[in-house]
Image (cartoon, rainbow, N blue to C red):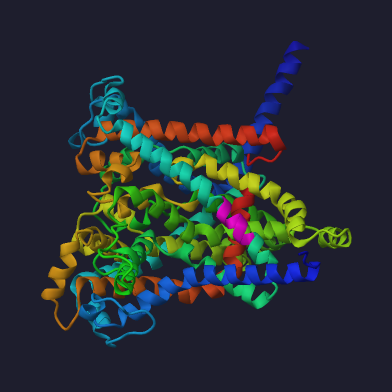
Amino acid sequence: MTLSQRQKDRIMDAGVAIALFIIMLCMLYPFYYVLILSFNKGTDSLLGGVYLWPRTFTFENYARFLNDPHWYQSFLVTISRTVSGTVLGVLFTCLVAYGLSHRDLLFRKSYFTIVIFAMYFSGGLIPYYVVLRSLGLLNSFGVYIIPSMLSTFFLLIAISFFQEIPQELKESAHIDGANEIVIFYRIIMPVSMPLIATMALFTGVGQWNSWLDSAYFVQSEELRTLAFRMMEVINKSSAPVDALAAANKAAAGVTSYSLQVAAMVVSIAPIVCVYPFLQKFFIQGIMLGSVKG
Amino acid sequence: MDLGTQMTNGSANNQSRADYWKRFKKQKVLHLFVGLGMIFLLIFAYSPMFGIVMAFKNYSISAGIRGIFTSEWVGLKHFDEFVNDYQFGTIVRNTLVLSFLKVIFAFPAPILLAILLNEAKNLRFKRFVQTVSYLPHFISWVVVVGLAFAFLSADSGLVNKALMSLGWIDKPLDILTNPDHFWGLAVGSAVWKEMGWWTIIFLAAIAGINPFLYEAAQIDGAGRLARIRHITLPGMQGTIIVVLILTIGSILGGGLVGSNFEQAFLLGNSINNPTSEIVQTYAFKVGLRDGRFSYAAAIDLIQSVISVTLIFSSNYIAKRLSGSSLF
């Protein structure tokens, strides 16, 4: 039996659509599942069988999340590090990039060599730890935002972006007597919004999701990040007995696991809300990044 | 005469030096900006590089940063010790297997998805699937592992509960703890998380293909599969090579699909340890947890030397083969 070209095309269209539909389900359902789980009574969730909607609907998981001093504190720490880390990181990287974007800058080549070398080579975790320790940054909020102030990757992207800005803009400002700080703040930053949005998105998401620095460099319980707390729960719940024991002493049907699920939703929600709006920016970002390497 | 040339030379030197100084003074604010950045790099990027010497010394953290230079030299002792560690073979194998499995499975996945998306007829459906597919890229590994627990854990995971209630299995599958399943779990979750993200760049490559090529092929009677093979794939070739270079350069860290360390750390536990312990987690444990700084620095150093060699050699090979390279 031979199929005509049109029939073959139809079969292929159907195959493609089915494959994409399955991929879409695989991507979406996990998020949907934790969402309904976070609104389901914790002790009830342990029984299983919750697939499409909450069986015993409750806000208790979220209420406990906000009332639990540890979770709440880590939530606040994560918000403050995301805001301050992003503002600081974007500003500082742009400032340095603005300086380096001047083609007539003296020692420009040497500066670039220093940047590129730092991009490819690193001392590794252990010497880095020793340096942070001697700077007194260990076990402080500063360790979350100061060492990540300058990203060499975004520095290079910002430099090439600033170089595209028409010289006339700067020159006319110079003639009007504006100094470099005013030019940077009043002219360069406003015309660089696509760049700034991309950098802010990536820096912000990185800060929001970060837990490694909390694990490496921080001991204080008050400075833990949201992601770190979730990591702790995951590590503990590797032992199967724990969930049942926790369920037995659970109050109001909230288990350590259902709290964790609520925390996961809290951690995912801002990203889901923000990213459809910033799509066009981060697509530019990945293109810039991967083409430049 | 002699004196005359000397004088003009001298004044020219003075002249240019004065010029330089003038230019520098004019640029002083810019140099201040850049200088701050350089100081930052000196502290956070370069001083740890000097700290690598501790890999050849007996360093103890109580000696502070100066101790790096004052502690006694022990040559290659720590390297020797690592190579002779009873776990050495296992963790090197785990690191390599995990890295290569990720290249084999996670590298082609976004290429396939890009082709699939390109073949989709309904544009709104295509856009929606694409948007959904790169959402996981922005989610922390911690959350991804949390999702894996929600589905796969032995006591409350959805998959186990569902299979049990259907009566297909008698006792829960121990996917999260069984050493035999760790590699599959790590590679699978990495593909899930990063496939959509890398699809963006491959779709951009496809978008750059001249549409006349497709029309011409259609007139010549090429079917859809033939068009994929002879037009879409060759059109993506340059991008595929660039991404492959990036992948191989960062292979020890997990390639493009992200962190071997985070996966091994989060999905690893005492039961699946025989397959989940990798060089990075081992270095972290002996270094920061047990406080054997010099030893861990030595392990780190071996790994970074291999990584840097890989980056430069894969780039060199790509340049020779195809003319595309990154730098």
Taking the spot 66% from the left edge, 49% from the top edge, the residue there is B239
| Residue B61 visible in the picture | yes
Residue B327 vertical position relative to residue B186 in the rendered view, above or below = above
Q: Is residue B110 magenta?
A: yes
Residue at image coords 33%, 73%:
B166
Relative to B149, say whether A135 is above or below. above
Q: Nearer the viewer, residue B314 or B60?
A: B314
**Residue furthest top as drawn:** B2
The percent position of residue A72, horizontal first and vertical second, equals 24, 73
Which of these two is toward me, A58 or A144? A58
Q: Is residue A158 magenta?
A: no
* Front residue of this view, candidates B325 and B281: B281
Q: Is residue B315 left or right of residue A208?
A: right
Q: Vertical placement of B50 versus A41: above or below?
A: above
Q: Which residues are magenta?
A: B108-114
User: Where residue A145 appears, x then y in whole percent?
Assistant: 37, 57
